[in-house]
Amino acid sequence: MSGENRALLLEALRDPAILGELDLKQWETLIREARRNNLLPRLAFDADALHLESRIPEQPREHLKAARAQAIAHAVAVKREVRFIDRALSTLGVPVVLLKGAAYLMGDLAAARGRLFSDVDILVPRSALAEVESALMLNGWTSLKTTPYDQRYYREWMHELPPLRHHTRQTVLDVHHAILPTTARLRPDSAKLLAASRPIPGEARLRVLAPVDMVLHSATHLFCNEDVGNSLRDLVDQDSLLRGFAGEEGFWATLAGRATELGLARPLFYGLRYARVVLATPVPASVLRAAERGRPPSLSLRLMDAAFLRMLRPGQLGQGSGAASLARGSLYLRAHWLRMPPLLLAYHLITKALRQEQAAVR
Amino acid sequence: MILRELSRQTLRSCLANGGVRLRTGPIVTCIRSRCDEVLNGLALLYADYPVEDEGSFADFHAAIAPPRSVRRWLRPQISFEFDGASPFFPLPADQAFAALEWGLNWCVSFHCHQYLIVHAACLERTGCALLLPGEPGSGKSTLCAGLVSRGWRLLSDELALLDFATGEAVPLPRPISLKNAAIDVIRAFAHDAVLSTPVHDTSKGSVAHMRAPLESVHRAGELARPRWIVLPKYRSDATTSLNPLSRGRAFMELADHAFNYDLHGRRGFDLLADIVSGCHCHTFEYSALDEAVTVFDTLSATA
Amino acid sequence: MQSLSVPRWRSVPRDAVALREFDGEFVVRNESTGNSHLLGLLAGRVLVVLLDARGSLDAAEIASHLDTTVSPVETGEAYDAVEEVLAEFCRLGLADIEST
C-alpha cells in the first residue's frame, strides 16, 4: 500500500506525534474516522502519552476528553466484571484464562490503553464446561440466546456456550473451551494453550495466554471472525501486542514455530503482513521468513489483499461506496467459511438472514 | 453570520451539498438534507442561530436522507444519519424535522461525555439555574415552554449539560419539543410563541417544536449555577403544590435521569453531590400552567 | 469458649466507597458493584462505623458504636435494627460476613 493518500487515522496511529500538528479541519476528519473505527479513545491516550494537550485546539480536545472518559469507564467495568467472574469460579479449582481485551487489561498491556471493551471472554478446559456454566448460573448469569436453533448453533457447532448475560449487571460473558469452533478447519489445541498460560501478577486464579499465543489468538480472531466491522481496531490490537512483546525473551524466536504447532500459520502470515503494511509494525526479517510457511495460494492472497486493504482504508465516510460495502460482505463470508463446513454454513446464513428481516419489520 | 441571513435558496443549496454548520451552544453540527421539512424547520426555528463557515470545526455530521435499504414502502421515508450510518429505524418523511431534533439530541447524549448529562429541562432566572428532571409525560416540556414564555432563560428542554470544572449548567438552547395536548396549551398560553406545524402519528403522538426565545440563543455562552431541583408532575385535576424533597432523594433522581452518571463513576458522584448540596429541592404537582409559573416566580426570589 | 460464633462483618474497602450525608440521609456509590444507594440515618451510620473500623465487627459492637448512651432496652432494639441493615448491606454488596 503506497504512502500517498493514506487516511489520516492511519497516519496518526503510525505516528502519534502528528496529533500535535493538526489543524481544525484535519481534526474534524480524524475524529470522524477514529470514531467510526472505535479508535477515538486510543488517540486520546496516544496524545496523553506524548503530552500534546496544549497543542490540540479546544473543540477537538473536548471530543478526546469525552472519549477518554468512555475508555476509563470501560476499563473500570471490565475490571469489576473480572472480579465477579473470579469470585463465581473461585471454588472450582479450574484454570480460567482471560482472553482478548480483558486479558490485555488485567495483564497491564499497552494494547489495553484507550481500548473499548464489549464482552468478557474466558477460556476453560472443555471437561470443566458444565461446572463452569453451573457456577455462573448460580451467581446470576443467564443464557442470552434462547431459541433451540441458537442453543444448538453455539453448543454443537461453535466453540462456546451461548453468551451469558448477568441478570442485574447486564454484562455479557463468553465462555470458550477452544478459540475456534470445533467444526472449523483450523483446530488449535486448547490443551496446549492452557498449558502455556501464565498467571496474572497479583491474581490467585486468573490466567492469560502466553505472549505468542495471545498474538496468535488476536490474528485468528482478526481473520476468522464474524464481526469484521472492527477490523482496524483488531489490527491495532495485533500491532500493540507485537510491539509490546518484542522485547520479551524468546518471543520472536518462538512465534512462527508456535503458529505451525497450533495450525495457525495462515492467520500469523496475514497478521504480520497487514500489521506491517498498515501500521508499520516492526517485525524481524527472520520471523517474516519463518512465517512464509503460512503463505496462501497467490489467488487467495490477492483477494485477501484487495478485500482487506480496501476495508482498512478508513476513507469512506458517509458516501458508503458500493465497493467498500461489498468488501465488507466478502470478508463476512470468508469468516464464516473458515468456521463452519459449507452445508452448515448455508443453513446458518439463511436462518440468520430471515430472523434479521423479521426484526427489522416494526 | 446567523441563519436568517442566508436566502432560502442558499440555505437549500448548502443543505443539499456541503451542509449547514449550525451552532447550538457549545456544539456545531454540520447538517445535510434535501427534505423540505428540514429546510422549513431550520428556517423557522433556527433563524437566529449562528451558522459557522466551511472552514470551521464541526463536532458532528448529521443528515436526514432517504434510507439506504432498497425496501419499498407505501409512504416515503427518511433516516437520521450520523457520519453516514443510521443508528435508528427509518421514519415517515413528514417527520423529517422531528427526526433531526431527536438525532441532534442523540449526538449530544451519546457522545458529549466531557459533561455529565441529565435528562432534564434547564432554565435560568436571576443568574441561577433550575433543573427539571422528568419522565416523559411528567409535563416538564410544557412547564419548560411556559416558563420560557414568561421570562425564564432557556438552557435546554431535554439535556442539562453539567460542567465538571465549575459545577455549572452549560446552555444548549434548542427548540422545545411539545407533544399532544401540550401543543394547544402552549399556543393558548403564549400567543406569540413560534411553533412548527405539528406532525402526527409519531411514536410519541403528535409533536411540534417551539422556537427558543431570542435572548436564550444570544446568551448561550452564559453558564449558570444550579440553585433549584424540581421534579414536576402534571396531573389533570391536581392542585398546584410545591413540596420539599430531600437532597438525598434529589441526588438519586438526578443520577437516575442522567445519561452518563455510571460512565463517570466517582467523578459523577462528586459532581452531583456538590450540585445538590447547593440546591433547594422540591417535587411539584400542577394542572394549570399560569399557577405553575407563579409558583416558580416566587421560587426564583429565594435564591 | 464460643458455642455459636457470631458473624463478624466487614464493609467493602474504604477506597471503593464514596459517601455524602444530606440532612440525615446518605448517598453512597460503591465502586465494587458500580451501584449507588440512598441510605437512611441508621443504615448510613452503620456503614460509616464499618468503613472506619480497622477490623471486622459484630452487630453488637456496631450498635454500641452508634450511640454510647442508650439504655439496655434501646440497645436491644438497636441491635435488631442493625442486624436488618447488615442483611440488606449483604444483599446490596456493601458489606459481607468475614469468612474465617
Image (tube, rainbow, N blue to C red):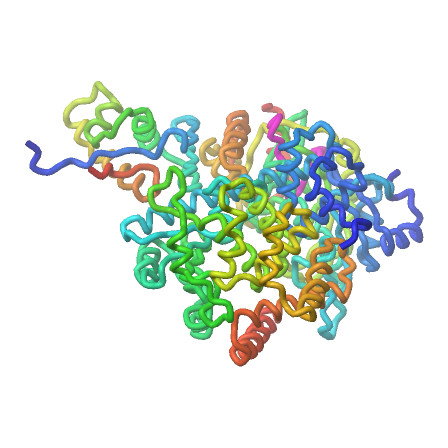
B203 relative position to B46: left or right: left
Quadrant in the picture for residue B300: top right
Image location of residue B260, percent across then percent down: 56, 42
- Relative height, residue B299 to residue A344 (above, below): above
| Number of numbered discs visible in the structure rendering | 0
Q: Which residue appears farthest toward the top when viewing the image?
A: C69
Q: Is residue A143 visible?
A: yes
Image location of residue A218, percent across then percent down: 54, 54
Q: Magenta stretch containing residue C40, yes or no?
A: no
Residue, x 66% and y 40% (percent of image)?
A43
Residue, x 63% and y 39% (percent of image)?
A66
- Relative height, residue A266 to residue A47 (above, below): below
- Relative height, residue A143 to residue B289 (above, below): below
Q: Nearer the viewer, residue B296 or A79?
A: A79
Residue, x 70% and y 64% (percent of image)?
A307
C22 relative position to A110: left or right: left
Q: Magenta stretch containing residue B163, yes or no?
A: yes
Image location of residue A240, percent across then percent down: 59, 45
Quadrant in the picture for residue C74: top left
Quick one: quadrant of the N terminus of chain B? top right
Image location of residue A349, percent across then percent down: 57, 75
Q: Nearer the viewer, residue A158 or C77?
A: A158
Q: Which residues are magenta?
A: B151-167
Q: Nearer the viewer, residue A152 or A197?
A: A197
A108 relative position to A323: left or right: left
Q: Is residue B258 visible?
A: no
Quick one: quadrant of the C terminus of chain B? top right
